[in-house]
Every structure is written in structure tokens, then in C-alpha cells.
Image (cartoon, helix red, strand yellow):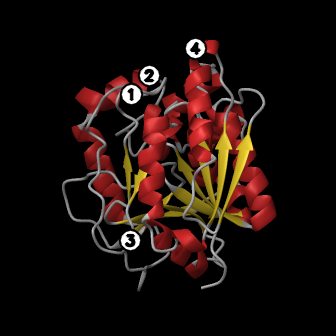
Amino acid sequence: MTSLAPIALFVYNRPEHLRVTVEALQKNALAQDSDLIVYSDASKTESQAEAVREVRNHIKKISGFRSVTVVERDRNFGLANSIIDGVTATVNKYGRIIVLEDDLVTSQYFLTYMNEALEKFADDDRVVSIHGYVYPVNQPLPEAFFLPGADCWGWATRQRGWTCFNGDGRFLLDELERRNLIRAFDFNGAYSFSKMLEAQINGANDSWAVRWYASAFLAGKLTLYPGRSLVHNIGNDNSGTHCGESASLDAELSKTPISLNAIKVEPSQEGRQAFERFFRQKQTGWLRRLTRKAGAMLKGCR
């Protein structure tokens, strides 16, 4: 394996979530050989200032990585702008990136999977990103599999992949409609990601992630998913501005590494059907509530 991808960690005002996230990441076998770049957003309101200061004091003490670089924003970017700016700067400098937020707890095999997959598919233009989280579906999944588009809970990409990103939500939605792709984009109507994109256009949310998904989907690109989750989101506990409290997305972290042998670079019907079934089973509960909250699942929590 060549040099490892840098890890970009985006943080705001949740010191306890950050502590758990960092401790899990430090347990990864490749942590000590990885460069960690922490993007710390500035406080939006005075009431959040103390929590932001506590977070910044904590990140200055982080160890266990090859290097730790802290980028302290001098004004509040908001989650979307902070991630878009930070990912762009990092991939332009290093050519690749692993992206985490401050409420994503990782398996000890997370960094190995991310770096091995980035290397394995380095020259395959069909592959836009690598994802670490997988929904807690009720049926077995392949060891690893591809789906169209992109995702946002613990992911990695190369510079060529991030060039697909288009921040113009109106263009993306119009193109999905023009090409009659809305139903496919919404997993055959199982979950209305297009409504989430429409809400972003109308200012009801500022989701970077639904635009990332739409950008990659329209470009015909694929994202690799693990058959067992390497990420658990601890942010759905009412601690973030955009997240309610729900255990429906909780994933048990894989206790074994993900094998990347003999993976076909093509959309997985088995994986897509499992996701569709999961979405449909949850429509009457958390999924509908999350839709009304402008899509915390793809937006990220803040």
C-alpha cells in the first residue's frame, strides 16, 4: 500500500461525541501512520461559544496519529460549507481523503478498509467513493458491494471523484427530472431523496450530502459499501440541530475486516433491494419524521 489517505474530521460543539469518535479512530491499526486534519467551525451564536471552546481545547491534545493539523474557522461556515471547503482543499493537496464528522464512531477496521479500497480502485473511473456505514438491514449482504451515487457517514474519495460534486441543487434536480431519473434516485419511491434536494433548493436545509449523492448519481458513478457496517452514528440523540432521537439507524460495528477480493464493479441488485426494503419498512416511523426535518440522514447532524 502506498502512503495513507489523510483523515479530515469536521467538528463543531459536541465535545463528548468528539471524544468517543477520536478514541475509536485511535484504535484503528493504521491510525499512527495517518495524518489527521481537524476542521473546527466557529460558533454561530454566543450560547454555543463555550462548547466550541471546549472542543477546540480537546482537539489540541489529540495524539496517536502520524500528524495532527487543526484548522480553526474564524467565522461560522455551517456544516455544508465547512465540509465542501475542507474536502476540496484536502483532495486538491493530497489527491485523496477520508471524511468523518464528530459523531461517527468507527470500527477498528475502518481505516484499513478505506485505504485498501482507495488503492484497489484508484484507476477505476467508475468508482467515485468508498463508504463505511451500511443500514441495519434484515437480510445478509455481500461482503462488499457497489451502488450508484455517493453517501456521507464515513466516506473516502479521490480528487477525480470529488470533481463530480456540483453544489447547484436546482441544476441537479432539473437534470434528474429531465432524464426521468427521479424514481431511481428515490430508490423506486422507497425514500424521497428528491424531496430532500428540493428542500435544499428552497432553503429548508443546507445539505451538502444530498447534492453529493445527486452529483455522483447523475454522473453514473458508483460507491463501494461494506456488507457489515464500519461506522456507527451516535449523533441521533437530539444533541445536534438537525437530528432527532432514533435508534433505527444504529448499526453494530463489524468485528471482522471487510474482504475486497472478487468484487464486481457494477451495481448490486442484492444491495439495492435490501436498501429499498429497509426504507419501505421504516416509512411510517423515523423515515417520515426525518423527511420532515429536511433529511438528517443525508445532511449530517449539527
Amino acid, disc 3: Ala
Please report whichever mark, 1 or 4, sits nearer to the chain's N-terminal start: 4
Please report whichever mark, 3 or 1, sits nearer to the chain's N-terminal start: 3
In x, y percent, where is residue 107? 37, 62
Q: CA distance from mark 3 to mark 1?
A: 27 Å
Instruction: Kindly identify which residue carries mark 3.
Output: 144
Amino acid, disc 1: Leu
In x, y percent, where is residue 103? 45, 42
Circle 4 packing at 10 Å, graded few (<14), some (14-19), many (20+), is: few
Please report whichever mark, 3 or 4, sits nearer to the chain's N-terminal start: 4
At mark 1, the secondary structure is helix
Instruction: Kindly identify which residue carries mark 2.
Output: 293
Q: CA distance from mark 1 to mark 2?
A: 5 Å
From the image, state whether disc 1 or disc 4 is nearer to you.
4
Where, by quadrant of the figure, is residue 285 drawn? top left
* Label 1–label 4 contact, CB within 8 A: no
Instruction: Kindly identify which residue carries mark 1.
Output: 290
Disc marking residue 47 = 4
Q: CA distance from mark 3 to mark 2?
A: 31 Å
Compared to residue 117, the image places residue 75 above or below, namely above
Work out which quarter of the rendered image holds the N terminus and state it. bottom right
Amino acid, disc 2: Lys
